[in-house]
Image (cartoon, rainbow, N blue to C red):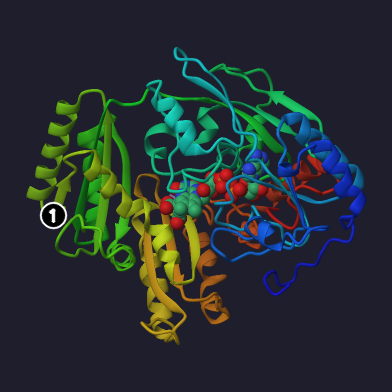
């Protein structure tokens, strides 16, 4: 298809037949556990499972399976492996690299029905839950018990914790709680031939041999389906404060970050960056929400502190702001006075991805670069788009704007190009130029979103041949028939 230039359907894979559908119907035993596009006119029902969040990638799957248990997943995969039916594991379908939807006619295995929380140990903080639990729901469960899920991101209302593991999602508080490679205690995974790997350990420490669960964290559904998760959840901080401020330059953003680490140290829980252009686009899409600061600034930062003493934390944050104001590092700033304002300040950061998509689509580059050089790529791409005459206010121009935002605390920038339509002229400027730029700075072409289909061909910009060769061997070891999420990753 045009959407996937150069990729052909792998003829090793069988086409779905009526007999297959009958087999799955009997196996799952309930009509709500399956969408049968082979026999029913299910086009409208299947569409959301075939298309990604960015409306960029579209598959042609004719069957969606919704297993209700690990045993269901195991039986499905065993059958698919024997029959050479290709599959795509799917969580909340909020992934940003086209990994969660089929390329051709792969069967979608959607995890939404597996959404039970199994246990939470209030002393150790270990939580065991199904992969299909929605992140926000899981965090609410934890909040009622004084704990917090050690990951938060803008898609929390839809993404699954299994999907979070599969993508090794980073999110808004990695600065505080670290990567999932550190907080995940164990996983239950169904391997492509149906074997169940039960490594659902709840211990903090376990150095008995290779740590195989780590392979599945960030594997994007290429070597198994994660069915249960065991994760270390910290205590929820009783005091949360948020400050939002404007700055003149990226140089000043870096100074502010250094000061924040020094002065707020152990209570700092997020340090996010938004450029002025991203904020004015949010404002365009949501003109009724009150801007945090009256004047416009080239850059904005959002700082969050989480601690155990509200007054003490607030005083620390105020004195930090006063200090950076006096030193002329920041130009203007505000501290949230209540929970509503706190949420509203966060919405100016968390709402960016959705607002950028308002005009039709977004080209996304999720990069890690040494922090000094982090923003330069936004100016560079912006200038290139202007020169090519692609940016404008009216429909004849494909590009609405080029913006940068991201997780300053982790040197992770999101370079985004908001467009009215996906367009080859725009693409020609972006790729492989952006990837070359990043490789040149020894950065990563995928800091947190993964490879999926979008970056499959560019992995060589961030990994050497030996490493890629080993990855391919691992894929072949786990999935010799290649049925799991084909055409993607390596
Ligand atoms: P899906 O999109 O359904 O799937 C993602 C990949 O994982 C696919 O390859 C799929 O095959 C595989 N997969 C899903 N479930 C399983 C499973 N149970 N077993 C095996 N494989 C599986 N990402 C960040 O890192 N940081 C952010 O701050 C962030 N913010 C976001 C904000 C918005 C508004 C949106 C739309 C996305 C954001 N993302 C972010 C992208 C991120 O990858 C996802 O939101 C999330 O981690 C994916 O979860 P999901 O359940 O939607 O997975
Ligand atoms: C974010 O940080 O907002 C997410 O990673 C999503 C995005 O990059 O747009
Ligand atoms: Zn992000």
- Asked if ligand 2 lies within 8 A of label 1, the reply is no
Compared to 20, does 353 lie above or below? below
Q: Is residue 377 above or below residue 300?
A: below
Residue for point 69% across, 57% down: 46
Relative to the observer, which residue lies in front, 209 or 204?
A: 204
Residue 224 image position (x, y, % from top left): 73, 39
Horizontally, residue 79 falls left or right of residue 30, namely right
Which residue is drawn at the image coordinates 53% and 23% (left, top)? 127
Residue 461 placed where, x, y %? Answer: 59, 59
Question: Which of the 4 image quadrants contains residue 405?
Answer: bottom left
Left/right placement of residue 476 relative to residue 103 reads right
Nearer the observer, 478 or 34: 34
As helix, strand or loop, the secondary structure at mark 1 comes to strand
> Left of 446 or right of it: where is 307?
left
Q: Give the residue number, with chain letter if any, for mark 1.
A: 332
For label 1, the crowd category at 10 Å Cα-Cα, with few meaning under 14, some 14 to 19 and many 20 or more, is: many
* Residue 258 versus residue 403 in the image, above or below: above
**Residue 339, quarter of picture:** top left
- For the question of whether residue 450 can be seen, the reply is yes
């Amino acid at each position: 298809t045009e959407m996937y230039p150069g990729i052909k359907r792998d003829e090793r894979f069988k086409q779905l037949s009526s007999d297959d559908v009958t087999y799955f119907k009997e196996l799952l035993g309930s009509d709500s556990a399956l969408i049968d596009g082979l026999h029913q006119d299910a086009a409208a029902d299947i569409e959301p499972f075939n298309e990604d969040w960015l409306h960029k990638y579209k598959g042609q799957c004719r069957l969606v399976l919704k297993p209700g248990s690990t045993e269901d997943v195991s039986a499905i995969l065993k059958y698919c492996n024997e029959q050479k039916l290709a599959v795509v594991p799917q969580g909340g379908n909020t992934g940003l690299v086209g990994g969660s939807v089929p390329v051709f006619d792969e069967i979608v295995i959607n995890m939404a029905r597996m959404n039970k929380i199994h246990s939470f140990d209030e002393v150790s903080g270990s939580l065991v839950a199904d992969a299909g639990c929605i992140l926000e729901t899981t965090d609410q469960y934890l909040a009622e018990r004084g704990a917090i899920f050690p990951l938060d991101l803008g898609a929390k209302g839809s993404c699954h914790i299994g999907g979070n593991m599969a993508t090794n999602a980073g999110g808004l508080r990695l600065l505080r709680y670290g990567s999932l490679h550190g907080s995940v205690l164990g996983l239950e995974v169904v391997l492509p031939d149906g074997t169940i790997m039960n490594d659902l350990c709840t211990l903090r420490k376990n150095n008995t041999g290779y740590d195989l669960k780590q392979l599945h964290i960030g594997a994007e559904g290429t070597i198994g389906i994660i069915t249960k998760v065991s994760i270390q959840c910290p205590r929820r901080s009783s005091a949360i404060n948020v400050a939002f401020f404007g700055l003149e330059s990226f140089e000043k953003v870096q100074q502010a970050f250094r000061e924040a680490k020094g002065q707020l140290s152990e209570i700092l829980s997020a340090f996010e960056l938004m450029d002025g252009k991203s904020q004015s686009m949010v404002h365009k899409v949501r003109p009724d929400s009150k801007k945090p600061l009256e004047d416009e600034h080239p850059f904005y930062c959002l700082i969050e502190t989480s601690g155990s003493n509200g007054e003490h934390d607030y005083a620390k944050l105020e004195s930090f702001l006063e200090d950076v104001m006096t030193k002329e590092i920041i130009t203007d700033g505000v501290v949230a006075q209540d929970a509503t304002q706190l949420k509203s300040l966060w919405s100016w950061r968390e709402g960016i991805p959705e607002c950028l998509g308002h005009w039709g689509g977004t080209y996304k580059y999720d990069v890690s670069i040494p922090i000094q050089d982090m923003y330069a790529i936004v100016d560079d791409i912006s200038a290139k788009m202007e020169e090519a005459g692609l940016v404008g206010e009216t429909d004849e121009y494909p590009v609405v704007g080029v913006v940068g935002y991201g997780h300053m605390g982790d040197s992770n920038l999101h370079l985004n190009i908001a467009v009215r339509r996906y367009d080859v002229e725009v693409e020609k400027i972006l790729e492989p130029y952006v990837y070359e730029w990043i490789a040149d700075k020894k950065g990563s072409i995928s800091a947190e979103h993964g490879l999926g289909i979008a970056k499959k061909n560019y992995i060589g910009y961030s990994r050497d041949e030996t490493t890629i060769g080993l990855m391919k061997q691992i894929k072949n070891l786990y999935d010799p028939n290649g049925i799991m999420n084909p055409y993607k990753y390596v």
